[in-house]
Image (spheres, rainbow, N blue to C red):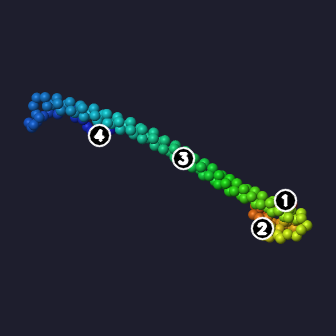
Amino acid sequence: MVDIHPRPTAPVSGGKGKGSGRGSGAKLEKQLAAATATVDELEAQVTALRARVEMLEGQVDHWKRRAAKHKSRVKKVTERAERALVEATEAARQRASAKAEKKIRQAIADHGTDDRPRAEPMALKDAPELPEASWNVTRLRSAAREQGVSGYSRMSKQQLLDVLI
């Protein structure tokens, strides 16, 4: 290390001013020695602190890499959770729709067992028409679209019938 504070090699001699006389040279020597010791201690502390800073700067890079890695993982998990939520919501909606259709069909079937003529309930007037095997694929897909069936465009006629009935 380069010494930035040159130290005198010969004792400082007092002049004819204040503080000159017996013992002032020894006193100055003691002060100089104490100051030199203090400077040496401070330089050692600066060296230790510089080493600590270098070590911590190395750790900063490590933690930045780990943070970026975890950030991408969080993003992936969040996307998966959002997709699962959408799928679960869609599945619940389809189950509810199927359950309602089943109730309507049951009501229609129950309604048709009597030979007495009855007025058709208001809810059944707007009910979707039940598909039949005689329907073509275009008509079945149209019914599936109206009922909110997902993936209907890739289904065969039999699959559409199974889903709609």
Q: Which residue is mark 3?
A: 67
Q: Counting other residues with Cα less than 10 Å from the Cα at mark 4, is it few (<14), some (14-19), or many (20 or more)?
A: few
Q: Earlier in the sequence, mark 1 or mark 4?
A: 4
Q: Amino acid at mark 4?
A: Ile
Mark 1 or 2: the one toward you: 2
Q: How far is mark 4 from mark 2, CA to CA?
A: 97 Å
Question: Residue at the spot x=86%, y=62% of the render?
Answer: 109
Q: How far is mark 3 from mark 2, CA to CA?
A: 57 Å
The dot on residue 4 is 4
Frontmost residue, 86 versus 48: 86
Picture layout, residue 124 above or below residue 63: below
Q: Position of residue 53 (x, y in %)?
A: 42, 41
Question: Residue at the spot x=73%, y=56% of the render?
Answer: 91
Q: Do the CB atoms of the residues marked 3 and 1 lie less than 8 Å apart?
A: no
Which quadrant would residue 44 be assigned to in this image?
A: top left
Give SS at disc 1. helix
Q: Which residue is mark 2?
A: 123
Give SS at disc 4. loop
Q: Counting other residues with Cα less than 10 Å from the Cα at mark 3, is it few (<14), some (14-19), or many (20 or more)?
A: few
Q: Which residue is mark 1?
A: 162
Q: Amino acid at mark 1?
A: Asp
146 vs 26, left or right, is right
Q: Earlier in the sequence, mark 1 or mark 2?
A: 2
